[in-house]
Each structure stands twice: as structure tokens, then as C-alpha cells.
Amino acid sequence: MSRLLDVDDLHAGYAGAAVLAGVSLFVDAGETVAVVGANGAGKTTLIRTLGGMVRATAGSVRFAGVEVAGLKSHRVCELGLAQVPEGRQLFPTLSVIDNLRLGAVLRRARARAAHSLERVYALFPRLKERHGQLAGTLSGGEQQMLAIGRSLMADPVMVMLDEPSLGLSPLMVETMFDAVRALNAEGMSVLLVEQNVADSLLLASRGYVLENGEVALTGSSAALLGDDRVRRAYLGL
């Protein structure tokens, strides 16, 4: 596999308060990798820093061979790295279709917008059924589908998902994870950031356990699920 995302000794934070303290990880092309950990471990800051929304204070982030640490978020997106933020951050007074169209405003995405829309509707038929409905009136699970769909409209080569299962029913969580499996089967690279340790590691090939802004453990998903520290701290075993 070729290296798609390579993060080396990444430091970041807010207003002088350090959150990430030397995070290193990588994602190969076509791979699904999970970053798991408790609330407050630095997972969202990691995603926001990789996506250009939080400025790195030290370290390197290379995506598709390009150094992106320090780039504005729209420049990172143009390279093909998309983000599905925690909390979805939709436009509630706009329709489903208008939210999706906004995902295709990037230069790289415009020519393939019609193809991308069909891809989203194939992945989430419910969005096609509700294409004219206001996003704010959708259920939580439907809003998460829309957030993922909007990111796919940018025609990315890799998607970062921040807590996609948060606040969803077990059935809807399985629907979300099935969608991630389908995207990965198409060749999409995925960085999945989750508190849902067991399910996300079962979905991914490898994982990183983040604690207090540092990588505490890393390995194959099978190795992490069998690790006594992970089982005690996150699986209640």
C-alpha cells in the first residue's frame, strides 16, 4: 500500500493550551484506521488540525505527498481530504439537496457533482426520498447521513469522520458503519475517530488509542481488542 496520510510528532492546541503532544500516525491508500479514546483525549482537535481548522504548533502532516500543516482548510479539501465534523454542522434551514450541493463547491468537485450526487443517493436512499426536506427537520441519523453525503460531494480520496455514532440508536450506528464499510470497499481511505471503541476497531484494520493528547497504544485492530489495557479501560472487561 502507498502512504496517503503521514502525521509526525504533531502538536496543537487552543489559545496557548496544548492539546496534542506529539501525535504520530499514518493511513495508507484504501485503508480504514480508527483513532479511539475517551472524551477529552484530543480526538476532535486531531481531526480539526489535520483538516486545517486548528493550526499545528509543531510537527508535520503530509497528505498525498504534500505538506498540509499550516494550510487553510479549503486548500486541504482541494487536495482531496474531507471532514465530517462532530455535531454534523449542517445548514438546518436549507434543504437536503442544497446542503449536498454546497459540498460540491470546490474546484475539484464541480465537474463530478452529478456523479457524486448519485453516489450519495445510492449509499443513503433515504436522502433521495427527503431531497426537498429541510435539514433541520431530519432525524439525528438522517442528519448524520447528510453530513457524510455532503463530504462525499467534495469528491475526496480520504474522509475523516469525527464521532459519527454520537447520539445515534444502535441500529443507526450500524447503518453508519455499514456506509463506512461500503466506502472503503470502493477504495476510499477513512480515518474514523470514535469513543465507540469496540465497533470502530472491528471496522478498521488498525487503530490508535489516544490518551491526553498522545498515542498510548497502536496496533492491528485484533491486537488492540485483545489488549488487557484496552479491554479494562474501554470495553469494561
Image: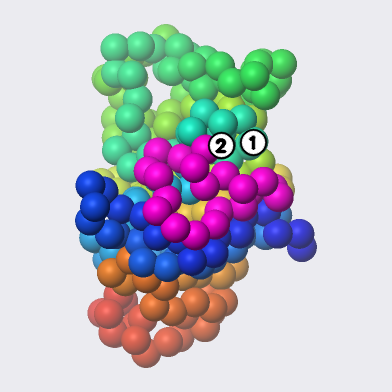
- Percent of width and height locating residue 116: 64, 24
What residue occupies the far bottom of the structure in this picture?
A: 228
| Residue at 61% across, 59% down | 6
- Percent of width and height locating residue 222: 53, 79
Q: Residue beneath label 2, please?
A: 76
Q: Is residue 168 magenta?
A: no
- Percent of width and height locating residue 225: 45, 79
Q: Is residue 58 magenta?
A: yes
Q: Residue beneath label 1, please?
A: 79
Magenta segment: 52-71
Q: Quadrant of the rendered structure where residue 193 is?
A: bottom left
Question: What is the crowding at mark 1: few (fewer than 14 residues within 10 Å), some, or many (at least 20)?
Answer: some
Left or right relative to 126: residue 38? left
| Residue at 48% across, 66% down | 9
Identity of the amino acid at label 2? Val
Identity of the amino acid at label 1? Leu
- Percent of width and height locating residue 103: 51, 22
Secondary structure, mark 1, is loop
> Is residue 179 positioned above or below 231 on the image?
above
| Residue at 54% across, 57% down | 60
Left or right relative to 99: residue 170? left
| Residue at 46% across, 70% down | 208
